[in-house]
Structures are given as structure tokens and as C-alpha cells.
Amino acid sequence: MSHHEKFTVGTLSYNKKGLWLVFFWLMWNDFSIMLLEQLTSLTSILMRDRGASYTLMAVFGTVGGVLGMWINPFFSTWSDRLRTKFGRRRPFLLIASPLFAVSLIFIPYMPDFYHYLMRFELMVAILNRLPVNGEVLFIGVASIVSGLFNSVVLAIFWYYYWDVVPEMVLGRFNSMSWIVTVMSGIVWSFFLVGYAEHHTKAVYIGVSIFCLSVYLMSVWRVKEGNYPPPEPRKTKNVFEPLFDYFKDCFSKPYYLWIFAVTLLFQMGNQGNTFQFFYLRNDLGLDLTATGWITGVGLTATTIFGVTLGYSAGSMIDRLKPIRVLPATFFVWSLLCLISYFYIHDKTSAASMACLININLFIFTVALGAVTVELFPREKIGQFCSAQAFLYQTIIMILNPVVISPFFDWLKFNRAGYLWSASFYFLTGLVSVKVYLNWKQKKKDVK
């Protein structure tokens, strides 16, 4: 990057120093939100340790999904069209992130709240009639509420990045972003998750307050530019935005193939839960050990990212992320297959975690940049939300009805590796089709 080179996105323009300053604040933004996401992973452990089945956990996930299924499309489309002096994305982040952090703090206190209510005869009569462990029920309900606020943050924060980071450096930005994400994972895995085994409440409170403070500061410091007026509505029909939304997003095969890639990928990710409980329950590894495994894998990614990450981002920018993405799915599938046969203790799990995380680094860098190639920038929030809406709805139905009952019946957590390997391979095949469609579309435009 030349010292005097200008970098623009919309009405924003940066020199080299200004660009690095934006990167600095957004890296803290990424660190804090990813650390909060790590904290949410404790919820399933709290529920499972209190006797919850996979199916029951999936039911809570589905209930939360039903309640929140419109959050992504509604807030994404709303943010595309919003015009305020603070921008179109920042108002949502500044309001939703405190609610998310505070709601997280309440989760580990839910068993205490349940036992407090059990001091009253009326509540005993009501709660004892429910066919669910009371502690699990209260944790599940609190996690649903927290998940709703989290959905708003997750629906917006990537669009915020795309609105303030010039497209020509997105690959490099995503490389740096992933390094910071990995660093948050290392902090969590080596220093926090083991502590959470016996000091759960302290971890929830400390992480939530720290991350909220950092996140609000970064969002406040990185300003958005000005946007052209949104496309006017054709009629005053209140349902017109809904009709336009589904017509734009679900009527063209080009976009449906992209959505299919995301759906298959997320189906593959469903195996992660059972892989974790294979380590925890079948191999008998506690949170300190599983945290060490994750930390070793993330450390390997950090070494790779620091030494080769920027170069990898530049290479991906030149090769085009859409060409790189299919290869990462095929590699991921192979690594999951190897994991099924190879992982039998802490050391073997850590070895595979290193390889998987390096591939994940390349995948994330490519994915972060490929979205702006595939979707129209002026409606990127709308299309991303439609993508999420489709896979979340389908998984929300399949998880409690098919996936979790299957693993409850199978009682073989190790099969989670085979599950992921199969779906990642299918994802790779379909992503090749998406690449061919993109290539044809480029020719048609010319």
C-alpha cells in the first residue's frame, strides 16, 4: 500500500494512516464480539451437565429460532434502508449489544432463580407439573432471550464492516480479523474456559462487562459514511416490503444455489456439538483439557496467520475468494474423516485441531470477501438475511425432529465427525456450481 494511496468505500475515503486506524478499532470490535460468542458455548454444557438430552437442547434451540426467525430479515432490510446521522448500522449495534451482554449475565443465575421460586407453594405446584428439569428449563429460557438480542447483533455487524472497509482490501482486512478472532479464542481456551468449570458466574460477568465496554467504544469510534436515499417503495401496501423481499431473494436460481451452499455448510456444522461431547463424555476430558485442545489449534492458526496471513489475504484477493472457497470445503471434509479414525486422546485431538483451524483461517478470509462478489452491495443485508433465514428455518425444523433424536438413539458421539465430513463434501460440490454460475454471470454482463 502506497503512503499516499487513497482507499474509498461509498463516501468514506482513507489515507494509509486512516485505514490502519479503522482496522485497529474494528479488530477490537471483532475481538469482543467473538469472545462473547465463545461465552454462549457454555450454555449447552450447563444444560447437558444437568441431564438435558440432545433432543431437549434442540427443542430450546428451535423455540428460540421460531421466535427469532424474523429478526435477521427484518433488521437486515431495515438497516439497508435506514438513514440517520449515526449511520444505518451503528444505531442497531449500539442498542442491541448492551442488551445481549446483560442478558448473558443472567444465564448462570437461572438455577439459583429456579430454586428460589421453589420456596413458594404455588410455584412448586406449577413447576413440578412440567416434564422438564427445572434448572434446564430456566437456563433454556434465558438462553432464548439472550439469543434474540444476539441475533440482532449478528444480523448487522458484518454489514457494518462491509460499509466502512474498502472492497479492495477486504481480503487483507479479513485476514487480520481472523487473526484477532483466533486471539480471542486463545484467551478463552487457555485462560477462561477452564476457570469456568468452577467459577461460571464470575466468567459470565467479567467477560460480558469487558466485551461490552470494548465493543461500544469501537462502534462509537468508527463512523459510517453517507448513503444514497433508499429505493422508494412502489406502493403504500404495508406488505410490499415482504413481497419484494421474497421475490428478490428466492425467485432466481443464481441466489438459490448460493443459499444451498450455506445450508449444506451449516448442516455440516451440526456435527460440532457431538464432536465436543465425544471429547467431554466419551474420552472424559474436562473443560480445561478441551480448552487446551482448542487453544493449541488456535495457536497454530495464529502462527500461520501472523507469518502468512497477510500474504494469504493478498493471494486470495488476486485469485478471487470464490475460487478458493470450494477447495476449503473439500479439505475440511477430508480432515473430519481423518479425525473420525485418528482422534483418541487429547494429543491427537489437538493435532487435528491445528490442521482444521489453519483451513478454517483460509475459509474465513475467503468467505468474508466472497459475499460482496455474489450479492448486490446496495441490498447486501437483505440477501444475507435471506440466506440466514433459509438455513436457520430448515435446521430449526430438522434439529429437534431428525438430527438430535438420531444422535440420542445412536449414542455414538464420534459419528459427529462423519456427519460433518459428508455435508462439507456436498458443500464443496455445490460451491463449484456457484462458481460456474458467477463466472457465467460475469460473461453475460460483459
Image (cartoon, rainbow, N blue to C red):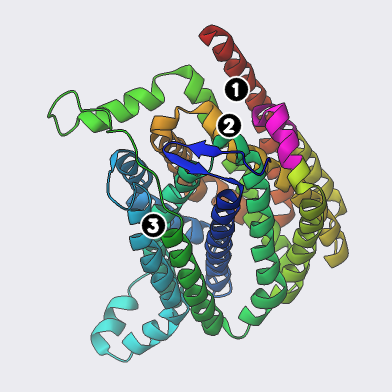
Residue 137, quarter of the rendered image? bottom left
Q: Main secondary structure of the magenta part?
A: helix
Q: Separation of disc 2 and disc 1 at Cα?
A: 8 Å
Q: What x and y, as percent, mark residue 237? A: 13, 29
Tell me if label 2 and label 1 are in contact, CB under 8 Å: yes
Check if mark 2's residue and mark 3's residue have beta carbons within 8 Å: no
Helix, strand or loop at label 2? It is helix
Residue 434 numbered mark, or none: 1
Amino acid type, label 1: Val
Q: Residue furthest bottom?
A: 119
Tag in front: 2 or 1 = 1
Name the amino acid type tagged 3. Answer: Leu
Residue 15 appears anywhere in the view:
yes
Circle 3 packing at 10 Å, graded few (<14), some (14-19), many (20+), is many
If you read the primary sequence from the N terminus, does the residue marked by circle 2 or circle 3 appear first? 3
Q: Give the residue at mark 3.
A: 93
Amino acid type, callout 2: Val
Report the magenta residues as a range: 312-328
Tell me if residue 321 is in the magenta stretch: yes
- Quarter occupied by the N terminus: top right
